[in-house]
Image (tube, rainbow, N blue to C red):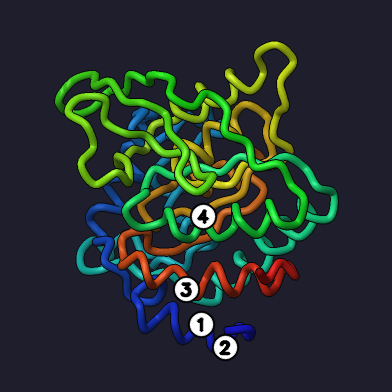
Amino acid sequence: MADGGALRAHLVAAGLAGRVTTSREKSLRSYALFAARDPRQTLGLDPEGVWDAGALLALMADRCGVSPDPGHTSGQDVIDPDCTVAALDAFAERLARAARDRVPVLLGTGHPDRLLGFYGALAAALSAAGCAVLTPGYGRCVDVPTPFGVRRHVLRYIAGVAVLRHAEPADPAGQGAHTHSPLPVRVALAAAAERGGVLPGLVVGDHGFLCGAGQLGFEAIGLGDSDDPAVFVAEAEGAVAVAVPLDDSVRADDYRPLSRYVLRRAWLVQ
């Protein structure tokens, strides 16, 4: 899938863009929570600007293609596939630069059940191109607030991609836990900085991995859904270099054409 037209068709067919599974109600609720600086929605970002719900809706309409009409309050949300393709092209360009310069990279996801394969393919290609794929803080504990109280997790790396695993009980599937927290990337970056260690020249991820790294001044690129305003605020304010709008809850296999497209565009085909 080398051309943007074929990718665009796949995005719509798979529900990655076009009409997506995220509801309009959920997106609007996320914008209101971000406007109130709820940490569940800021994802580790400390915004510089004043972002009320109206400003966020306008931003998300521009960056993602959601409806700009505040009177549209129900139904399924929409992501413009042309926005997704353009952002993936910019994403690929940044990966190509990292490979050319052989910068150390750190990859992480809060959606390991869906996105681990996407990031794992990037990690393998970047490693083959001569980039050091970093795994700092492996095995360290991360105490993450959840709706059920603070729960202890462990930072792990699968195929070069940082994920959280439940400390107790053990994660039976082995893929990791879902999280939007910036705490895992903070732990990983703090570990990388210890004793003059190697710091990443690029961080690739989503949610807290993306915004948390960008807030700390690391160049970061990644993915965001239509109900993730922090990702696109971070891009608008320059904390994140590239934010790709897409639905982050479809089948894991449906992200494979995206990784193939990005790697071809970046001249990183394995």
Mark 2 is surrounded, within 10 Å at the Cα level, by few (under 14), some (14 to 19) or many (20 or more) other residues, namely few
**Can I make out residue 237 in this image?**
no
Do tag 3 and tag 2 residues touch (Cβ < 8 Å)? no
Q: Earlier in the sequence, mark 1 or mark 3?
A: 1
> Amino acid type of disc 2?
Gly
Question: CB of mark 2 within 8 Å of CB of mark 1?
Answer: yes
| Residues at marks 2 and 4 touching, judged by CB atoms closer than 8 Å | no
Asked which secondary structure carries label 3, the reply is loop
* Disc 4 from disc 3: Cα separation: 26 Å
Tell me, for residue 120, which label it has, or none: 4
Q: Nearer the viewer, residue 261 or 121?
A: 121
Q: Read off the residue under disc 3.
A: 80
Q: Residue at x 50, y 44 (%)?
A: 161
Residue 32 quadrant: top left
Find disc 2 in the rendering and name its residue: 5
> Callout 4, which amino acid?
Gly
Q: Name the front one of labels 1 and 4.
A: 4
Q: Quadrant of residue 183?
A: top left
For the point 71% across and 66% down, which residue is it? Answer: 268
Which sits in the foreground, 256 or 9?
Answer: 256
Q: Position of residue 64 (x, y in %)?
A: 48, 63
Mark 4 or 3, which is nearer the eye?
A: 4
Whole-number angstrom distance, CA of label 3 to CA of label 2: 13 Å
Q: Earlier in the sequence, mark 1 or mark 4?
A: 1
Name the residue that disc number 1 marks: 8
Q: Amino acid at mark 3?
A: Asp
Q: Is residue 38 above or below residue 174?
A: above
- Mark identifier at residue 207: none
Please tell me how many numbered marks the rendered image carries: 4
